[in-house]
Amino acid sequence: MSTRIDKINELIKHQVNDIILKDLSLKSGVFVTISKVDTTSDMRYARVFISIFPEREINYAAKTLNREIFRIQGELNKRLKTKILPKIEFRVDMTESKADKIEKLLKEL
């Protein structure tokens, strides 16, 4: 992967996180963090992987983000100073949850 794409991923991660924190109102006790961003090499699309806590609020938080995606995308487009503005797509990152389940299973052995 090129360093250019790595820099774009970090920039998008930082900016989308800032937009979610400042401009999106989730119900109290629901936390959304961006675990990683994966931008295509042509910079047309960016998959934004999110972790949601607590797990029981995954559906609520994911629906809220997808409902507000055009507003988030618009704010991101204002902040990015790139010729091509990648279209974002949210994906729930279940890595941490799966790791916890595996760790619990290993402890049971």
Image (tube, grey):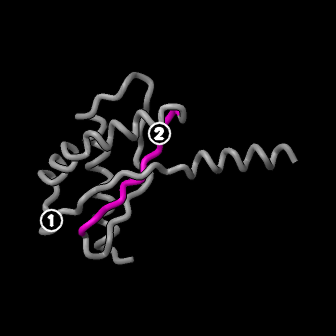
Pick the residue in front: 13 or 53.
53
Pick the residue in front: 95 or 68.
68
Residue appearing at x 30%, y 66% in the figure: 7
| Magenta extent | 44-54
Q: Tell which circle, 2 or 1, labels the residue nearer the N-terminal end.
A: 2
Is residue 101 shown left or right of residue 81? right
Our reading of the magenta stretch's main secondary structure is strand
Q: Which residue is mark 2?
A: 52
Q: Nearer the viewer, mark 2 or mark 1?
A: 2
What label does residue 82 carry, if any?
1
Is residue 60 shown left or right of residue 68? right
Within-10-Å neighbours for mark 2: few <14, some 14–19, many 20+: many
Residue 52 belongs to the span the image colors magenta = yes
Badge 2 amino acid: Ile
Is residue 75 shown left or right of residue 47? left
Q: Residue furthest right?
A: 109
Vertically, is 42 above or below 11? below
Residue appearing at x 28%, y 48% in the figure: 16
Q: List x then y, in percent, for residue 100.
A: 66, 45
Q: Secondary structure at mark 1?
A: loop
Residue 1 belongs to the span the image colors magenta = no
Where, by quadrant of the figure, is residue 19 drawn?
top left
- CB contact under 8 Å: marks 2 and 1: no
Vertically, is 3 above or below 50? below
Q: Secondary structure at mark 2?
A: strand
Residue appearing at x 27%, y 33% in the figure: 24
Quarter of the picture containing the N terminus is: bottom left
Badge 1 amino acid: Thr
Vertically, is 99 above or below 86? above
Q: How many numbered marks does the figure carry?
A: 2
Q: List x then y, in percent, for residue 51.
A: 47, 44
